[in-house]
Amino acid sequence: MSILSGLLALALLVALFVVIPMLLMRSSSPTLARVVEVVAAVTIALVGLFAVTTLFQSLVNDRTVATLAVQPRVPSVDVPGLELDAPIATVLGADGATVTYAVSGLTWLPRVLLAAANLLQVALTIYFAWTIRKLARNVRKAVPFEGLSQLLIGGGVLLFAAYLTWSILGSAGSAIAAEQVLGIHGASYTGDNPLVIAAMEIGDYSSLGWPAPANWGVMFDSAPVGIAFALVLVGVAFAAGERMQRDTQGLV
């Protein structure tokens, strides 16, 4: 599970915390609430199965799917005697690039770091699926706000902390994996091509077509922080609803 897909899933879950209560409370039948419960339970099962399969493949079967950061390179071809018609646009610079590989032979450290980052995302997805399941069950019992405020506020705090953690773990694991997959620490050459000789002298073979691993760095996105803040606000709103629900219990 990539970080982007995890964030999209979490954003969808946040939206559902607004849409689902409206749909459930407008419905006079418990059928919709029951459907939501089943969908949430199936989601938990599928995500859990995905996590177990991924962990088995990476830690037991030595097959890890890793998104590696590589150094960007301005498009160019350095072949003696070859001239290309220049495009009409000029590349002024390039940001970091990533490529996803299924690899084997990684040491335990990057495999554990990447697995831990994925597990955090899986655990958070299960947490919110369970919360939605509880919401649907509450609606069926005519107590929609009961026990949800703390789950939502806690979910916002957990999202913020987990996002920072899995970003650091995932970036570190990817950087180590990139070095182990793409790093070249020696070469031999018997020809006289000056381009090859120059690449060997500086230890950078990207000009010959071999991708070079990028320097380690962590990039943070503001979207998860905004989602976490929204969850806390929704939790506060649910807390107010829970108080009103307790105050009106027994009233006709």
Image (cartoon, rainbow, N blue to C red):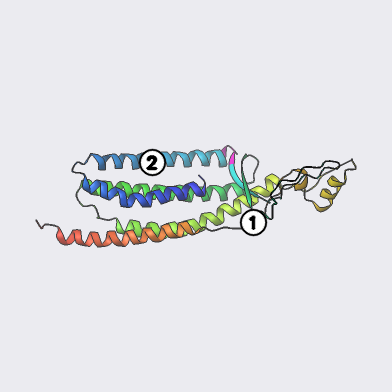
- The image quadrant where one finds the C terminus is bottom left
Q: Mark 2 falls on what kind of element?
A: helix
Residue kind at label 2, given as amino acid type: Thr
Residue denoted by label 1 = 216
Residue kind at label 1, given as amino acid type: Trp
Q: CA distance from mark 1 to mark 2?
A: 34 Å
* Residue drawn at 24 percent across, 49 percent down: 138
Q: Point out residue 99 in the picture as x, y percentages from the top left corner.
A: 62, 44
Crowdedness near tag 1: few (<14), some (14–19) or many (≥20) residues, C-alpha within 10 Å: some
Q: Point out residue 105 in the picture as x, y percentages from the top left corner.
A: 65, 41
Residue denoted by label 2 = 43
Q: Is residue 77 above or below residue 246?
A: above
Query: Is residue 139 located in the magenta-colored stretch of the structure?
Result: no
Q: Mark 1 falls on what kind of element?
A: loop
* Residue drawn at 87 percent across, 46 percent down: 194
Crowdedness near tag 2: few (<14), some (14–19) or many (≥20) residues, C-alpha within 10 Å: some
**Image mark count:** 2
Image-based side of 103 in relation to 30, left or right: right
The part of the chain drawn in magenta is 59-64
First of labels 1, 2 by sequence position: 2
For this rendering, which residue is in front, 11 or 84?
84
